[in-house]
Every structure is written in C-alpha cells, then in structure tokens.
C-alpha cells in the first residue's frame, strides 16, 4: 500500500478496511505492507522511488495498491512522476485497464441511458506514446522557442496491448473490440497501429473488430456507449477516452484502474487526483479506491471476493449510503465502514 498524497491518505485506508473484510469473509489471508512514499516523505528526506523498489516488488509482493499523487508543496510534482510513472515504466506495466461500468442509472449524465448501455473496458497502452518524455526545448524562454514532444510506438508495444484486448474479450465471451487512433493525421506511429490491428484481429475471427478515429470515438461514447465492449488505443488517447468513460459511468469518484503486466506484480489505483483542497475533511469519495481493490482481487484470482465488493458498492448507491458528491450524507470513513460491513455479510465462501 502506498497511500500517497491528499485524499489518498483517506480513501486508501477506507479501501483497506473493505479489503480486509472481503478477504476474511472469503477465508483468505492478505498480508499488507505500507510505504510512506509521497510528498511528506519527499519534503522530509528527498525520497521518491527508492532504487531497490522495483526489485523488492518483483521479489516480495503480488500487487501494489496506490493512492493519489500530487501536492502543491511540490510544484514540480517530481515525487509523483518518479513514483507513479517510475513504477509503470520500470515494472513494464503495459496494460492500463479502465472499466467504464454504470452501477446505477441515476448517476450518468447521459439522458435515458441505463446500466446495460454503459458497460465496457478501455485498454490504454501504458508504456509508450507521448508519455515517454522524449523531446525537449530549444531557445527556451525566447520568442524563437521550439518545443518537441515525440510519440514513440514500437511493434512490440502496439502488438501486445492489441492482443491483450482481444484475449480479454475472448476470455469473457465479449463480442466487440474497437481500436482507436488518429491515423488520418498521425501518419507513422498510427500506421503501425493500423497494420498490427489488422493482423492480430485475423487470429480472433469470432470477435467483431472495428476502427474509429479518436475524435469520432469520443463522440460515439456520448451518443451511444452501448455499441462498445472493449476499446484499445494509445497512451494519450486512452487517457482521454477512459476519463470520458469514467464520467459517463458516474464520475471519477467511482472509477478504478489497473496497471498490469500479466503474470507479474501489478499496480492498482483509483484514477481521481489527490484533491488537496478537500483533503483531511472526511468528504472524499472512497468508492473508486474500493472498486480498485475489486480489480486487484480479480487479477489475483479472488473473483468471489471481487464480486462481493462490487455488489456492496451497487447496494450502497441504491440505498444512498454515499458521500456528498453522490448525494449522500456519509463521510469517507463512514462509507468505508458501511461497505466493509456489507461485504462481511455477503456469502462469498
């Protein structure tokens, strides 16, 4: 566990209470170790991601539960970049998985849409693209300044995320995989996406495959989200599409995510920010962090426990046992306690 900064220090403890309750109800044992990496630690002694962290995670752990990162006392957010991006790249967590699932139709901003209309997964390539930090500034701060940001795409990286999307759909008997790019404008890297997608989809003839340019994809997600089962796209476009998907499914406070390298230690985090303006007030929504635990359990093979957590969240939404952002009157701690108690009553054995 790395609670991180801001509301991360509130939502992760709430999620851990639910984690322990679900594990106990299922007769499981979960050994937890907490690391204090974040702004407080960085400001105290300069620690971001210790040099032995990656080796330690590979050797000693099955999963990482991460809270939000970011603190106004560190304007550069160097600690957040070193920890989050450092773990993504150094652990080679090439799959960013963002489920967009509407648990209760009252919480979507889309008119006349129900739970059956919004239920899809966005897979974002997580280690390449525009986020690798290749590029630079020339004549910085002058009228002639030039800024270059390079979009890195490798055959290996593109193929493995596309293949993961198809394998995910096949394993769950889903019908459709849509790949999104901007190959009509971004010629070289996205031509690679086009060619690899056309090749890989031949191995999955039972799955309907389609392509949409990213601008059209975003419009279609709002117009008719029911047409999607699985979306796979690049790092930048996946970041944007998955945030939109989270919003139409009830908001980022209900949005979990996973950063996965299949078969290896992987990282799980709610996608909301550290929200420093509301930190410490017991008003943050912990449900995204709780649903992140469910994703972690599913990855670890604890499917009954994962289902119990999701069932408890649905029940909480239905009964109004929610924080203020979802119209309820409970605080962060109280929502966590309610969900932990609900999970404890669920027969997962």
Image (cartoon, grey):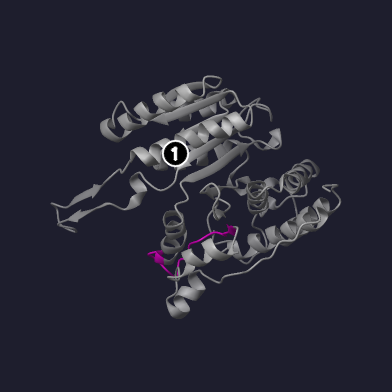
The one nearer the camera, 76 or 154, is: 154
Q: Position of residue 59 (x, y in %)?
A: 54, 64
Where residue 176 sits in the image (x, y, percent)?
A: 55, 24
Q: Is 209 situated above or below 280?
A: above
- Residue 286: image quadrant is bottom right
Picture coordinates of residue 9 (x, y %)?
61, 65
- The range drawn in magenta is 63-78
Q: Is residue 225 depicted above or below 134 in this figure? A: above
Determine if the magenta segment contains residue 245. Answer: no
Is residue 4 something one can see in this rendering? no
**Residue 18 appears left or right of 178:** right
Quadrant holding the N terminus: bottom right
Q: Is residue 67 magenta?
A: yes
Q: Nearer the viewer, residue 278 or 165?
A: 165
Most foreground residue, 266 or 15:
266
Q: Please determine whether, in this image, residue 51 is positioned above or below residue 341.
A: below
Counting the numbered discs, the total is 1
Question: Is residue 151 visible to the viewer in this orientation of the structure?
Answer: yes
- Residue occupied by mark 1: 160
The residue shown at (46%, 70%) is 52
Point out residue 67 in the picture as x, y percentages from the top left corner: 57, 60
Residue farthest toward the bottom in the current orientation of the protein: 45
Residue 10: quarter of image: bottom right
Q: Badge 1 local density, few (<14 within 10 Å), some, or many (20+)?
A: some
- Picture layout, residue 159 above or below residue 286: above
Decide whether the magenta segment is chiefly helix, strand or loop.
loop
Task: Give SS at disc 1.
Answer: helix
The residue sitting at 40% across, 25% down in the picture is: 199
């Amino acid at each position: 566990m790395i609670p991180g900064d801001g509301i991360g220090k509130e939502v992760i403890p709430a999620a851990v209470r639910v984690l322990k309750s679900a594990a106990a109800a299922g007769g499981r044992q979960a050994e937890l170790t907490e690391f204090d990496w974040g702004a407080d630690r960085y400001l105290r002694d300069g620690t971001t991601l210790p040099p032995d962290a990656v080796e330690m995670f590979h050797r000693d752990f099955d999963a990482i539960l991460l809270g939000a990162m970011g603190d106004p006392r560190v304007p550069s957010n160097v600690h957040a970049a070193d920890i989050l991006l450092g773990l993504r790249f150094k652990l080679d967590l090439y799959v960013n998985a963002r489920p967009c699932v509407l648990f209760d139709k009252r919480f979507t901003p889309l008119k006349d849409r129900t739970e059956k209309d919004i239920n899809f997964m966005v897979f974002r390539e997580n280690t390449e693209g525009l986020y690798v930090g290749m590029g630079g500034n020339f004549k910085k701060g002058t009228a002639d300044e030039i800024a270059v940001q390079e979009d890195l795409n490798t055959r290996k990286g593109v193929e493995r995320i596309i293949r993961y999307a198809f394998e995910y759909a096949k394993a769950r008997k889903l019908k459709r995989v849509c790949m999104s790019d901007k190959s009509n404008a971004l010629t070289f890297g996205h031509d690679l996406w086009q060619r690899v997608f056309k090749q890989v989809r031949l191995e999955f003839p039972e799955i309907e495959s389609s392509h949409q340019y990213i601008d059209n994809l975003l419009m279609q997600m709002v117009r008719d989200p029911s047409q999607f089962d699985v979306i796979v796209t690049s790092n930048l476009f996946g970041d944007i599409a998955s945030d939109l998907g989270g919003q139409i499914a009830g908001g980022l406070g209900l949005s979990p995510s996973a950063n996965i390298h299949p078969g290896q230690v992987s990282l799980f985090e709610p996608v909301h920010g550290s929200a420093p303006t509301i930190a410490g007030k017991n008003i943050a929504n912990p449900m995204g962090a709780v649903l992140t635990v469910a994703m972690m359990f599913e990855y670890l093979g604890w499917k009954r426990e994962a289902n119990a957590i999701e069932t408890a969240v649905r029940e909480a939404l239905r009964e109004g046992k929610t924080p203020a952002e979802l119209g309820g009157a409970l605080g962060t701690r109280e929502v966590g306690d309610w969900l932990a108690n609900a999970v404890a009553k669920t027969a997962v054995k």
